[in-house]
Image (cartoon, rainbow, N blue to C red):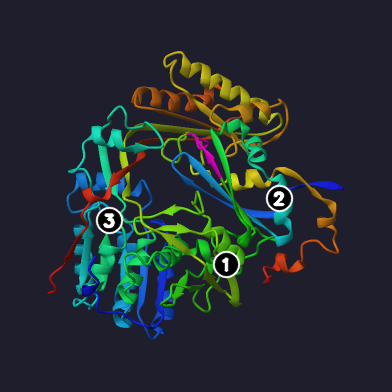
Amino acid sequence: MTRAVSLYELAHARSGDKGNRLNIAVVCREPVFFEPLRERLTEDFVARVFRERKPTAVRRYELPKLHAFNFVLDDVLDGGVNGSLGLDGHGKTLSFLLLSAEIEIPASLLDPTEGPSPEFMSGGSR
Amino acid sequence: MAQAGRHAVVAKQVWIGAAAGFAGDRPDSSGPLIEALAQHDGPRFLIFETLAERTLALAQLDRLADPARGEVPALKRLLWPALAPCAAAGIRIIGNFGGANPFGAAAKIKAWAAELGCADLKIAVVAGDDLRGTFTAADFARLETDGTLLSGEPAIISANAYLGADAIAEALDQGADVVVTGRVADPALVLGPLKHSFGWADDDWDRLAAGILAGHLLECGSQVTGGYFADPGVKDVPGMDVLGYPIAEVDPDGTFTITKPAGTGGLVDRRTVTEQILYEIHDPAAYLTPDAILDLTQVELMEIGPDRIRVTGARGRARPETLKATVCFDGGFLAEAEISYAGQNARSRAVLAIETVVKRVARPHPSLHVRADLIGIVSVFGDTAGTLLDASIPSGQDGDLRVRFAAETSDRAAAECLLDEVEALYCAGPAGGGGVRKRLTPRLRSASCLIDRTHVTPQISLLETA
């Protein structure tokens, strides 16, 4: 059984830019989320989230030791910080556009007895 | 570079603090860092990273207006409070705050040092990043990567190669207390002092990569110590108002610990460090720098204490034969104007304002593309074509909305037409529009080139001491 949740429930993220190219680091809140996200948080999935910006390429890099993914989206920043007409030419805010996407994951991972530890919420060590 | 000149090889840890991650960074960051670094019995350095892509072109425009200027404008604000305390504690300073005029910046620093009673500071300049005398606009057009912005051979304002760590290390070898650079690869600000202190060989790729990773984690200042991280209730960061800036405690083998000064706010944990490891990275197996190619894929983090993360596993490969260069050129004008609508039916009135301005501007300037955003509905998430905005504009709905218009053009009259038409909404627009603000900004565009490293010769000059 799966359940739809926002990616925000499973991960945190940070965007960076180089010219017209955006990268978004997606870091799993819990190591246990890495495998299901590897399966579902695909390049196609991310391309769909950003479809209005018409990316010419979306690449995903996996970092299992950091429980993280790095997404690189080409040509989505309207020319980048020196060319964009938008308020956020860096794309700094776009990490939260990706985090707002809904994603299906096994419901068992969200079971409160086995789900994210309260330690995460307080920033404790894992 | 010859290892013979490297006399300061040490077996102790080297501590490096980062007091600035960009030109707009906070001036009181250095105090706690200097206090913490002073406790270390071993080589200690403070770095300032202040050169975003565009900052150097702006500095070049300053220099054209006044040959004595051209340094990073924040130089005095950032460095003045740090200079005397660093001199007293034997902390050496490295910064790319020279901008478009490292010699001018060094002269200013020398004068301030005298004023502050530390006239004996040795100040070195690393130059050689400026490529304007080496390449023509046609050369740059040929060398451009990831685009064709330079194909029309625009008038170039600045063109600078990203220098590596060698020249910084050499300046330190020569005894510099303050190293002033223009454009260098940001991590080189950290790798330079590490190469100087540990005497790492030029082909010791794994150690160089570790130093680059330390530099990458420090170069954005507080972004690794809880800055740009807080999300209340989910990712809480204590003491945001007194955020500590980072220190890397580096071992001779290149492994290092990221931490921050005691008593400061902020947070160093797996999450803050992981977010920053991948910041502005593309292929994590191949982060290209002038000094080595860094492979991050085997990096591991260990929480070894409160606000202490041990970083291991950086791997390196031979440095690229090309250097990246950023070329900046005139980009016309950016025209921006805003107006607010609030209360009943605000959304419909805001949409009518957009339609009205777009039609009015199109009559005299049919080729001017006007972007409109509805701040409060869709703005930063929106695309310039307005697809996302169109999809989310049903009429009606109350609210407190701000309409933002933007256009880019080299035709000043067209830019001003947009600004005037937004202001005209005060009388000739929908009901209840208020709070117009408008701004016309000269724009700089930038492009990236790859150049053969044999065309670039870094120069190191030590200023005469008084």
Q: In the rendered structure, the residue with mark 3 lies on which chain?
A: B
Which element is circle 2 on? Answer: helix
**At which x and y percent is residue B74?**
34, 58
Residue at the image point whose x is 15% and y is 68% from the top: B463
* Foreground residue among B269 and B382: B269
Q: In the rendered structure, the residue with mark 2 lies on which chain?
A: A
Dividing the picture into quadrants, the one containing residue B342 is top right
Which element is circle 3 on? Answer: loop
Residue B449's place in the image compared with B70, above or below, is above
- Please give the label number shown on residue A37: 2
- Please give the label number shown on residue B276: none
| Classed neighbour count for the residue bearing mark 2: other residues with Cα under 10 Å, few (<14), some (14–19), many (≥20) | many
| Classed neighbour count for the residue bearing mark 3: other residues with Cα under 10 Å, few (<14), some (14–19), many (≥20) | many
* Magenta span of residues: A72-78
Q: Quadrant of the C terminus of chain A?
A: bottom right
Check if residue B127 falls in the magenta segment: no
Q: Is residue B14 visible?
A: yes
Q: Are marks 3 and 1 on the same chain?
A: yes
**At which x and y percent is residue A102?**
74, 43
Residue B369's place in the image compared with A30, above or below, is above
Q: Are marks 1 and 2 on the same chain?
A: no
**At which x and y percent is residue B116?**
24, 75
